[in-house]
Image (cartoon, helix red, strand yellow):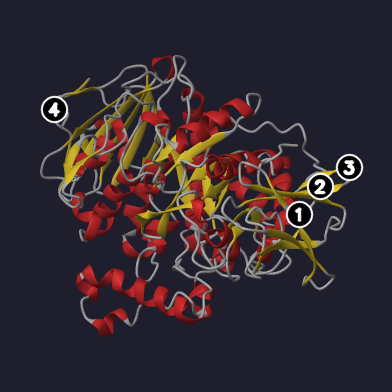
Amino acid sequence: MFETSWGPRLVSSGAEFRLWAPSAPSIELAVGDAKGEPAVFLPMEKDDAGWWRLTTDKVSVGGAYGFRLNDGLVVPDPASRRQFGDVHSLSVLTDPNAYRWTTPEWNGRPWEETVFYELHTGTFSQKGTFEGIEDKLDFLKSVGITTIELLPVAQFMGKRGWGYDGVMLYCPHEAYGGDAGLKRLIDAAHSRGLSVFLDVVYNHFGPDGNYLGAYAPEFFHEEIHTPWGPAIAYDEEPVRAFMIENSLYWLEEFRFDGLRLDAIDSIKDTTDTPLVKELAAAVRKRFPGRHVHLTTEDDRNITWHIERGETGQPLLVSGEWNDDLHHTVHVLATHEQEAYYADYTRGSVSQIAKSLATGFVFQGDYSPVRDKKIGSRSEHLPPTAFVNFIQNHDQIGNRAFGERLTDLASRRMVECAQAILLLSPHIPLIFMGEEWGETHPFCFFTDFDGDLADAVREGRRSEFAKFTAFHAAETRELIPDPNAETTFAASMLDWSELNRPNHLRRLEQVKRLLKIRRETIVPLLKNVPANCGSYYSAEDTLAFAVVWTLQDGKALHLFANLSDEPWPLPSDLTPTDLTAGDLVHAYPANADSRLADGTLPPTSVVFRLSDQKLIMGGTA
């Protein structure tokens, strides 16, 4: 079992407890009683590197412990594996080898097979636990999902929250089922051939329950400010080890198949080697015999971390979340153009075509919203270097009322977007409920109280003041209170909706699309050449064409018309036989026959696969 620098370690004489607090004048181990209250205090010794250590048999597996500072404050272990109660309680000593895996031979799935299903544990089921997810694994497999991605589960304050306010990054949330419940879920998923990813946050800690600054101020750079407070001091080796070892811990002890690194652009690393580079290299080295993958979220549109090797294999990170693709689809589907959507104007259908063909929209281009050039060239990367989506937790939950795309766009527009997402050669991600067209919102919610609750509520509402609909203070008062239990309850998936004809229809469509992807597209994704995509976008309309050269020279063609008028295909799209090869998918059903006549009907999508690549004359 992988040994971390932080946290307790079982030894023959009991357990060794460790805490890095280089400037603390004294640290004592607090031994808890049966009620989880500190009862006995044992002095610890500090080494030259600032680590306080004590080996003792006074804490048995399942027993409570913590640390008492020189001012009398008793704190939990920042690397706690289990909590006796909430983030302010004592920690619990665990045995990492106690769980007996039923799928020890599981080695994961190849990256190109990935179809992500992003979910929030607390609102995915009425149980709101890991067990509640386990109950639905057979359903998810039947849909065609291959990979479940959990929003962060590290212990945060309260029972309700997105998870991005975690303060104990080694501790699965007790309200969800703790470490044992999480291992059972992953084991059950693997027994069904499903991979499991975890969203992890290494750019900040939550505002309630983070005691690190009380005994290790060296953990932070007070002079470097972030939206969440002082920056994490990644130039300190124990701090760097805390995060890198955390990633290895999840992948080894819990057998996760991959991690999604949240907002790496917000990691303020002052060293010469970016944390993500060192972390990803450590993961690649540690798990050479398993299909273990990393994905990242980064607002900068950088590419150095998703570059490929000579044989096309990811060198560090397998895929980058592509917000650009989402934004172009959202603008075209909803006509919204405020805030960051202003960079993706409705008339620029070339943006969606460019993103599908070459990765990012902004590849060193000027962004009016950000008033600077954004991004790096990405056309040389294979489509599988990008994780695409038309909805996710952020893009739904960061709306004032948490509306889903189903409520914001026409049915036909959503179904066109869904086909483009699931049949394009990128790695697709759908958000829980999207497979059947869930209409319940997914709001931003927390479980804070007092001044912190007030600050979060008012801060949340003030964020929307720049939107026309919320210029007036009275309209901002209508935005749901994140701390209200009703906001959380409104965000629960309504599984009864599956019984409604329109939702069953959407579900069957998604199943068909994923079956086509699995049988027709995935086999062509392993050895995709560089610069494989090209595109044509029509001026003064919402129509475009994209072609990707995939494995063995196979050409996947996409024709899309997202306008309300028919699109006569330009004569310079050659060869003139637009029906060469095989039909992969047409929406609506007659779109392919119209394409053969040189016209694409309104709000339609056609995918074709052939040995002959169309020359995209007039490519934007």
Are the residues at dot 2 and dot 1 in contact (C-beta closer than 8 Å)?
Answer: yes
Q: Is residue 32 above or below residue 349?
A: below
| Among numbered discs 3 and 4, the one appearing first in the sequence | 3
Which of the numbered marks, if any, corresponds to residue 476?
Answer: none
> Which mark is nearer the camera, 3 or 4?
3
Q: Which type of secondary structure does the marked residue at label 1 adopt? A: helix
Q: Is residue 272 above or below residue 130?
A: above
Q: Which residue bears the numbered disc 1?
A: 180
* Residue kind at label 2, given as amino acid type: Tyr
**Viewed as shown, does residue 79 lie left or right of 420?**
right
> Which mark is nearer the camera, 2 or 4?
2
| Distance in Å between CA atoms under marks 1 and 4 | 58 Å
The quadrant the C terminus occupies is top left
The quadrant the N terminus occupies is top right
Q: Which residue bears the numbered disc 3?
A: 12
| Among numbered discs 1 and 4, the one appearing first in the sequence | 1
